[in-house]
Each structure stands twice: as C-alpha cells, then as structure tokens.
Image: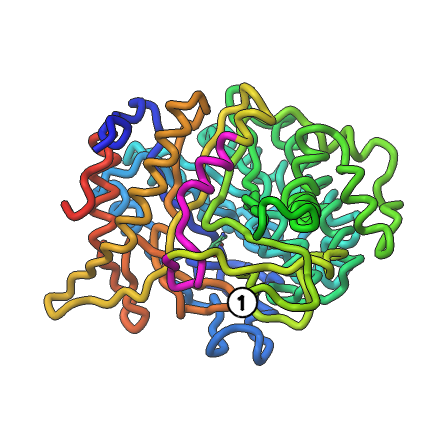
Amino acid sequence: MSDLMTAAFPPSFLWGAATSAYQIEGAVREDGRTPSIWDTFSHTPGKTAGGDSGDIAVDHYHRFRDDVALMADLGLTAYRFSVSWSRVQPTGRGPAVQVGLDFYRRLVDELLSKGIKPAVTLYHWDLPQELEDAGGWPERDTAHRFAEYAQIVGEALGDRVEHWITLNEPWCSAFLGYASGVHAPGRTDPAASLKAAHHLNLAHGLGASALRSVMPARNEVALSLNSSVVRPLSPGNAEDLAAVRKIDDLANGVFHGPILKGAYPQTLLAATSSLTDWSFVLDGDLRSINQPLDALGLNYYTPTLVSAADAEPRGPRSDGHGASAHSPWPGADDVAFHQTPGERTEMGWTIDPTGLHELIMRYAEEAPGLPLYVTENGAAYDDKPDADGRVHDPERIAYLHGHLCAVRRAMADGADVRGYYLWSLLDNFEWAYGYEKRFGAVYVDYATLARTPKSSAIWYGRAARTGTLPEVGTA
Ligand code: IFM
C-alpha cells in the first residue's frame, strides 16, 4: 500500500456531503413556495423517467432534523445544501417570505448545534417559473434578480454560514437547460444557451458582490463548476486535439475565462460566431464577473473523450448527458463524443480518479493560491437492501476510496484542497432520471421514506472521524 493511501488528511479538512433543494426537500406547495422551472418541467409528460417529480422527493423539508442527526452520527463535519429561490422569493423579485427563510435558519442552526459546518449554494437549477416566463437566463434581468436574491439570503444567514457558493454547475443550467433541453426549462436554442451562459456568469459576479456587501468579510464566496477533463481519442491526431480545444472552451473556458481571467477565450468566440456575435456582453460585464473569489468548488464524476467527427464513426459515441436530438455543445457539430473505456457506474459514467487529480492540478496551476474544494463527487449504483435490511455498496466504497486517494495525491503535489463533499447524502431525485439512479450514501425507501445508511456511509464516516481512508472492505 502506498504511503499516500494511509497518509492523514489535515485536521481542518472538511468531510462533507452535498444535496440540493429540489432533489430532496419536497413540500413544493408549502409555506408560500411557488413553482420553479423544475416543477413545470417534471410535470410535463415525457420529460423525466416515469414522470417522476420532486413534489415529495425525500421529504427533507419535514425531516431535516433527522437528516442532520444522521450526518452527526456518521461523523460528517460539513454539509452543502441549496436554497430554493422560489421558497424565499416566490416571484423571483421583491421582498422575501420570512417563513421560507426561517426553514433555512432552522436547518443552519441545527447543523451548527451538531458541529457541522453549513455550506450554502444559492442556485442549484431551480429558477422561479415567473423569471423563466419573463425570459429566463437568456434574459439579462435574471442576473440582477439573482443578485437581489443573493443579498436577501446573505443578510439572513451571513452571520452563521461561512461557506457560500453562488451557482452550482452553470454549464448544466445553460447548455442542458437551453441547448439540448434535457433539463428544465427544456429549450433547444443554441444561441440562447450562450446568452444564458453569459448571464449566469454575470449573476455569479453580481451575486458575489451582493453577498459581500452584507456579510462579514471572513465568509468565503465561491462557485461550483462541473469542469470537464477533456481528452483526445487519439492524442497524436491534430484534429482530435482541435476537438479537445473546442470542448474545453465550451465546458470550461466559457466560465473560468471570464470568472478567473476577465475574458472569454478568443477560440470560443470564433467557434460560436455563426450562432452569435456575443453583443449581449456589455461594457463593464467582464469586470463585474471577474470578482476575486475566496475559493473554488470542483464537481467531478468522469472524464470526457472526444475526437473529430469523422465520416466513419470511430467506436460507440456518448457524451454522458442524456438522449436528445439537440446537442448541448453549440458550434461543435464537428466533434464526436466517445465512451471512455473502463468500469462504469449506473449512470454509464466511466470511473477514473486520475481525472479528479488532473482537474485539481489544473486549477492549482491556473488559479494559484485559490483554496479548492471538491464540492461534488460520487456514484450511482443499483443499491438494494439485503434480507436483514442492510445495504451493502462495495462499489461505491471503492469509488470514494479511489477519488479520495486522488484528492490526497493532489494535496501532496501541492494543491490547497480544503474539503470534499460526497454526492449525495441521500438517494434523491436525479433530475431527468427521476428516482431511478441512487447516488446516496444513505438509502431511501421511497415507499416509506425510511433512511438506512449504506456501508459506504459507515466507511466515509470512519474516514471523517479518523482523517485517514479506511481500507476498502472494512465497512
Ligand atoms: O445530481 C446531480 C447534481 O444535482 C449536480 N451534479 C451532478 C449530480 C449527479 O448527476
């Protein structure tokens, strides 16, 4: 066994789990909450597996104290959750509903009373439907509405929450929501998706400033990107390398260009010029977006393998983002996506911890000195209770072990990684896949909503308590 596999993580390292509001809360019609785009989308026939919706989800809204107790029993030290915008600001504008904010105040207080650090994500894909009706993310005003909402939540929770994330995975909001349409609001307009991406960037920048204007300076403001590790099918082939460049711009550069460097990559502007002239980027926008960050969140599941789209397809194709006749990659019809070889999870995503190491090292180099968190990482498996009601998930333990080793290796290589949030605390509503895919460390029986920690939860809890990775096969 290599020394790194047994090397301790620093005592300050956060051992967390992550969730999001629409995926777990339920209670969609309670206490003044209004529909978000995901309520509308999931109630549109044919949009989610089995017609599933988050109406009840795992009823966390009513069971949050039990869920916090579960985390405390396991030994977790951090919890990342998101706020439902339409629970706090039902029309997406104007004054807040206090009862909505009170739910999050109670949740935060419960976490703090158990010694668990809360990390708040302001936007995890559930735009108030009223704002979509007014144009959604392709409409500039949505970014200003987000800043107003950020200020409201910052005022309410900024005294007790240190860790803040403006947006979760804006790539999914922009490109799965407005280009391929497999996510809410289900639009299939490539030009609108690029506008949406810019307005999400602007929302991040304006939201970060709004948070800072009302919160103590010690609080950390970050955002979570599902940055892709893009690899060529044939590393020696110049056309495949050009395909990597294009997808890297559309997956990564479109966000970290303006956010970290204050500019969109020229290669991105050129590759999308037949769709848009980017005239929606107004004077001053890039300055607003390029706010200094206190930390960066990385969400990682699997690498992306691409080639030039040859007339003769080279092997099976898949970009892992669901079936749609419309591509989530605007301007990249000349790129083909391939299945990375190797073992896969239930999502069909290849397991490759080297990608996580690569991603962390890339950010450590591109944004030197910026603290990093893995804000999501995990795997879906077809978990089932055994005759005694226990849920054994050795594959998930192996997945977590491999990826946590990659994190530890990146730290040994000099990256400043401060924490890891397993996705997800509980089995939950996996968007277009409904409840078919189970990502939880805790099993949820959807008939009774009873929670049972899987063996991976016990294993991960041991890691959290000891600061070292238990051997696989010990839970
Ligand atoms: O469930 C999602 C989460 O909401 C965002 N990141 C990826 C997860 C797994 O698909």
**Residue 459 image position (x, y, % from top left):** 21, 44
Q: Which residue is mark 1?
A: 316
Relative to 317, 114 lies left or right: left
Position of the N terminus by quadrant: top left
Which span of residues is magenta-colored? Answer: 343-361
Residue at horizontal 63 percent and vertical 36 percent from the top: 151
In the depicted view, which residue is nearer to us: 421 or 396? 396
On the rendered structure, is 331 left or right of 432?
right
Work out which residue is located at the far left of the displayed protein and give it.
Answer: 388
- Whether residue 94 appears in this view of the structure is no
Q: Position of residue 204 (x, y in %)?
A: 66, 38
Left or right, residue 152 beside residue 31: right
Mark 1 residue element: loop
Q: How many numbered circles does the render carry?
A: 1
Depth check, front residue: 337 or 300: 337
Residue 385 drawn above or below residue 2? below
Say if 312 sits above or below 216 in the image: below
Residue 359 lies in magenta, yes or no? yes
Residue under the point 66% across and 36% down: 256
Q: Residue at x 37, y 36 (%)?
A: 406
Rendered location of residue 77, percent (x, y): 31, 34
Residue 340 in view, yes or no: yes
Q: Amino acid at mark 1?
A: Pro
Residue 420, percent from left and from top: 39, 37
Magenta stretch encompasses residue 447:
no
Around disc 1, counting alpha carbons within 10 Å, would you say few (fewer than 14), some (14 to 19), or many (20 or more)? few
**Does 308 sit above or below residue 388?**
above
Q: Is residue 140 above or below residue 152?
A: below
